[in-house]
Image (cartoon, grey):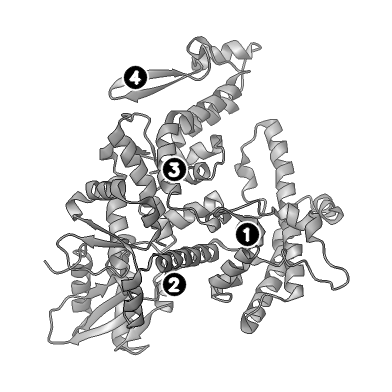
Amino acid sequence: KILLELLVTELPQAFILSKAVVPAVRGFLNDRIRTQAVRKTLDDPTFWHGVLLMQLLFLANDKLRDAQSAELDRFGTDHVLLQNRFLHMDEFQITALDEETIPPIVACQQLFQASHFISRGSINALPSPSALVCGDEFVLKTTTMQMPGEFCILLMHRNLVPVAFKQKVLQVSNTMKQRTLQDRSLGPSQIFAMMAGQAIRPFVLIEVARDNIVEDTARFLRQADPAALHLPLKVKFAGEDGQDEGGVRREFFQVLIRKLFDESYAMFTRDSESQATWFSQSVLQTEDTDQLFKVCGTVIGLAVYNNEAGIQIHFPVALFKKLKGEPLTLADLQDIKPKVWMSMQQLLSWEPSTDDANKEFEDTFCLTFAATYEYFGENISQALKEGGDDILVNFDSRREYVDLYCQWLLETSIQRQFQILADGFNQVVDSALWSLLTAEEAHLVVCSEPALDVADLRRGARYDGYAEGDPYLEEFWKILESFDVTQLKKFLAFSTGTDRAPLGGLHEIQMIVKKNGVEPTDRLPTAQTCFNMLLLPTYASPEKLQKLLLLAIENSEGFGLQ
């Protein structure tokens, strides 16, 4: 505690942390992680001493930022000024964990061995960075110079662990749970089949028609046993030949979510400026509508639980704050309705030009403590507090108005819709590790859209029938590099089933490029999305390769030839 206060006192500017101290400590931790990975252990005392130091620096950065935030609040200044002045959380993180150094299953098992922190499927009171640094139960043992065992659990320091690694741990946890439930569900016939060498394990199967996917899915979920949804999900598109080894399910989520959250259902709106999807206030409160909101939540939950990251919907971080029970503020409004957020900022920054600030404010803005919205063509006024329709907002009460308006817009007016969606989500996602993620990290896991880097895709690629450095492959990669973002997204959807990159980058796809015939041929490139495999014929010229590859990716939705 004394050292922390000393750091805050002696480092009035955080640039000293960012330019020298934090990079040095992060470099040390990365080296220690790589060394321990070779020995397949996490028992190096010096590594955990470094972790303690990094947590101390993390807290110092937070205290410095909080102090300056309070100073800005006194003068009503925008906090955007602080964004580049202090370190972001990812600057404290152990980046070597993204280099496949420590297997995610090791970190998962290590955390669950600390069983008293796990209670009824959720992380129960995991210590904060402050508790880890200053708590009595985490004091260094001076006789051995080692930290206590509970301190030496990697995921206990979740603020120092990159989100891509945490996502992999969550995926491992989901898979372990599915396998455990499958084992419990095995009947005598399945056990005898497995003894005979047949890999038969229970799963939940949903069959849908592509042109009726929303209604078919809603009907299935309405009739399904909630417990069965924790088994692995497999999907069958009616009238199509695809066998689901992961690729059919991936496309199911992409097609379903694109249609389910379309504005034609009048359940969600999309802001024209931010493109963020948010709950509509003008929703009919009917049993059918409630059912569809629950379907929305359940589908998002199933995508997370079945390790399908990167859904094609632009939810703001605010949704995940609400799912985690965190309050929303004016800052969250910026991602949802930027124009409204700007209007609120203008109210707060307005300065009077006369001695009577309250009267001037009332005459300038003509606002009451009420919100107006459109409900199927009719303008509805909603009082923000008792008698608010008749109470004018003045200079002194403007902050109260902004707070009440934000609470109404982000919480009260959409509470019913959100709660039903949350119930659907929570009946599927009950993993203890989900709570390890911050709202920002959960947003990245579910809605991630990292940059699409062809060089990174190539770095993880493997070949079958072709050799690394083959001149034909060089032409293939040049063609991909020439694609614009839209074409590259279509190529990824064609070859992997999703147009999104994993959080760790495209190399994690480990795409297989397999030779599939030679000239003379007019066979199009094809793909086995379940295995991220591109079946690529060897054409006579780069021009023919580009022409037929573009033709294939432009006509790629569906399974089986039609």
Name the residue: 69% across, 71% down: 29
Identify the amino acid type marked 2.
Glu
Q: Tag count in the figure?
A: 4
- What whole-number distance in Å separates the C-alpha atoms at marks 3 and 1? 24 Å
- N-terminal-most mark, 4 or 3: 4
In this view, which residue lies farthest toward the right?
Answer: 143
- Residue at the image position 13 percent from the left and 83 percent from the top: 521
Crowd rating for badge 3 (residues with CA inside 10 Å; few <14, some 14–19, many 20+):
many
Q: Amino acid at mark 4?
A: Asn
CA distance separating discs 1 and 2: 22 Å
Drawn side of residue 487 relative to residue 57, left or right: left
Residue beneath the point at 42% across and 62% down: 307
What secondary structure is found at the residue carrying circle 1?
Answer: helix
Residue 141 picture location, percent across and down: 84, 67
Q: State yes or no: discs 4 and 3 in contact (Cβ < 8 Å).
A: no
The answer for how far apart the CA atoms under marks 1 and 4 are is 47 Å
Residue 422, label in figure: 3
On residue 379, the disc is 4
Q: Residues within 10 Å of mark 1 (few under 14, many from 20)?
A: some
- Measure the C-alpha gap from mark 4 to mark 3: 29 Å
Q: Earlier in the sequence, mark 4 or mark 2?
A: 4
Residue 370 image point, x, y percent: 47, 18
Give the residue at mark 1. Answer: 158
Is label 2 or label 3 in front? 3
Residue 508 circle label? 2
Left or right: 111, with 493 as reference point: right
Q: Amino acid at mark 3?
A: Ala
